[in-house]
Amino acid sequence: MTRWLPALVAVAVFTALVVLGSMAPEHLAEPNLELGLKSWLQSPPLGTDTRGRPLLEYAMQGARVVVFPAFTAGIAVAIASVIGGLLRCVGDARVDGAVAAFGELVGALPRMVVILVVAILIPGTERSLLPLALTWAVLCSPGAMDEAAAVAERLGGARFVEALRAHGFSWNRIFLYHIVALNLRPVVVRQACETITQVTFLELALSYLSVQQNQSSFTHADDLRSWADLLKLGYPSLVIPEVGTGHALAAGLFLVGMVVLSARLGTYAARAR
């Protein structure tokens, strides 16, 4: 039960974010200055912005921007981690050398510089977080593969596979069940969850910088809003409480906290016995 409970909560929180993003409108509602800067009590559930538009629409559009690309990047890193662990069980020095060379080459690249180059190369009419998320996943994959390979090495690598084959186990049961499901699972799930969190914060950082500079975002189209817009709207309340935008900051932090909570609970549920 200690594993199932956090797993169910993590899935429920992530599903809520997916549903939130799927319900996102294409455009924000029309301004209504009479409802400007209403709190969540005055205009539930999240209040309104300075023009009277519901912050719930900001939340839905932000979920639409970040959830699917972050999840895709997490899956990509998880697959790379599984591949790294399984290749270590092959017991071929040439394969290990090729994996090490790939890790050194990709690991030497400066991540943020590569991300910015990719962002600049994306046409302005096709801005999306997905290419940046997949690029981040590729840059993170060497570390995930190395950690999974280290776990497989502690198992015995090729000797572990040979021992199970000697006991009559099939290849599917050896690699998919004993190696991946039982031994690599904590590493694979943790690396995937960490990547989801990292991509979320990457989107927030890039969008916040764009909002600060009043420029188009690298991660989404101009008619969409990010969770960074909520943080930007609510930040002045930390300096001047009288501006009345604290509810926007709380909403942005709550949404980011949902992502972090889901990732942490997923990691906890998949921990080693």
Image (tube, rainbow, N blue to C red):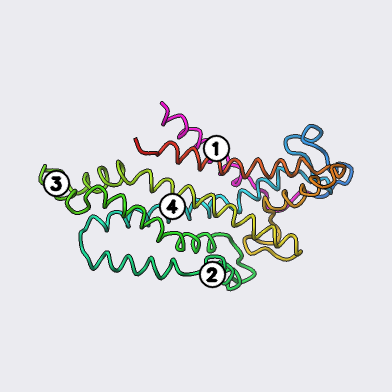
Q: Amino acid at mark 3?
A: Ala
Residue at (27, 54) in percent of width and height: 86
Q: Amino acid at mark 2?
A: Val
Cα gap from disc 1 to disc 2, whole angstroms: 31 Å
Q: Report if residue 16 lies within the magenta region.
A: yes
Tag shown at residue 163 = 3
Q: Which residues are magenta?
A: 1-29
Residue at (77, 39) in percent of width and height: 47
* Marks 2 and 3 close (CB-CB < 8 Å): no
Tag shown at residue 13 = 1
Cα gap from disc 2 to disc 3, whole angstroms: 43 Å
Cα gap from disc 2 to disc 4, whole angstroms: 21 Å
* Marks 2 and 4 close (CB-CB < 8 Å): no
Cα gap from disc 1 to disc 4, whole angstroms: 18 Å
Q: Amino acid at mark 4?
A: Ile
Cα gap from disc 3 to disc 1, whole angstroms: 41 Å
Q: Nearer the viewer, mark 1 or mark 2?
A: 2
Asked if one can make out residue 193 in the rendered structure from this viewpoint, the answer is yes
> Dot 1, how many residues are within 10 Å of its Cα: few (below 14), some (14-19), or many (20+)?
some
Q: Which residue is outermost to the top? A: 1
